[in-house]
């Protein structure tokens, strides 16, 4: 197995398209750092209104991140919505 086939999430042959499921799995690795805010919410370190808004923001960020990863049909073939989702993901990350 070549490293290019692993990093491209499939679709290295002629006419093959990368699998969205493989791309989702690969992009989800980028969400590993969110275990710390989730642990804060689950263990009760953050409570009340801060916990509510934190959970809401976390859910919105994850949804936006995954939608951004899945809207392009192929690498370099972005849809018009991809830019909007990328902007929303960036804004949520900054907040």
Image: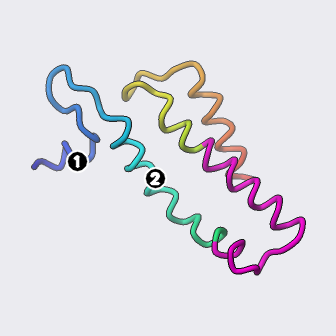
- The mark nearer the N terminus, 2 or 1, is 1
Quadrant of residue 85 within the rendered picture: top right
| Position in image of residue 13 (x %, y %) | 14, 28
Q: Residues within 10 Å of mark 1 (few under 14, many from 20)?
A: few
In the displayed image of the protein, which residue is found farthest to the right?
49
The image quarter in which residue 40 lies: bottom right
Name the side, left or right, on which 95 lies relative to 72. Answer: right
Majority secondary structure of magenta residues:
helix
Relative to 93, say whether 44 is above or below.
below
Mark 2–mark 1 Cα distance, whole angstroms, equals 15 Å
Q: Which residues are magenta?
A: 39-64
Task: Name which quarter of the figure residue 52 lies in.
Answer: bottom right
- The location of residue 65, given as percent across then percent down, is 57, 44
Would you name the residue on which mark 2 appears? 28
Q: What is the image's colouring?
A: rainbow
Structural crowding at the residue carrying mark 2, measured as other residues with C-alpha within 10 Å and reported as few (<14), some (14–19) or many (≥20): some
Secondary structure type for disc 1: helix
Q: Does the magenta segment cover residue 22?
A: no
Q: Position of residue 81 (x, y in %)?
A: 60, 23
């Amino acid at each position: 197995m070549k490293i290019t086939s692993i990093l491209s999430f499939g679709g290295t042959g002629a006419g093959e398209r990368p699998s969205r499921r493989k791309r989702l799995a690969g992009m989800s690795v980028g969400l590993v750092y969110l275990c710390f805010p989730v642990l804060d919410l689950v263990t009760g370190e953050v409570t009340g209104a801060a916990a509510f808004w934190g959970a809401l923001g976390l859910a919105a960020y994850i949804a936006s991140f995954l939608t951004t990863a899945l809207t392009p049909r192929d690498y370099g073939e972005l849809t018009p919505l991809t830019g909007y989702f990328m902007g929303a993901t960036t804004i949520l990350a900054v907040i």
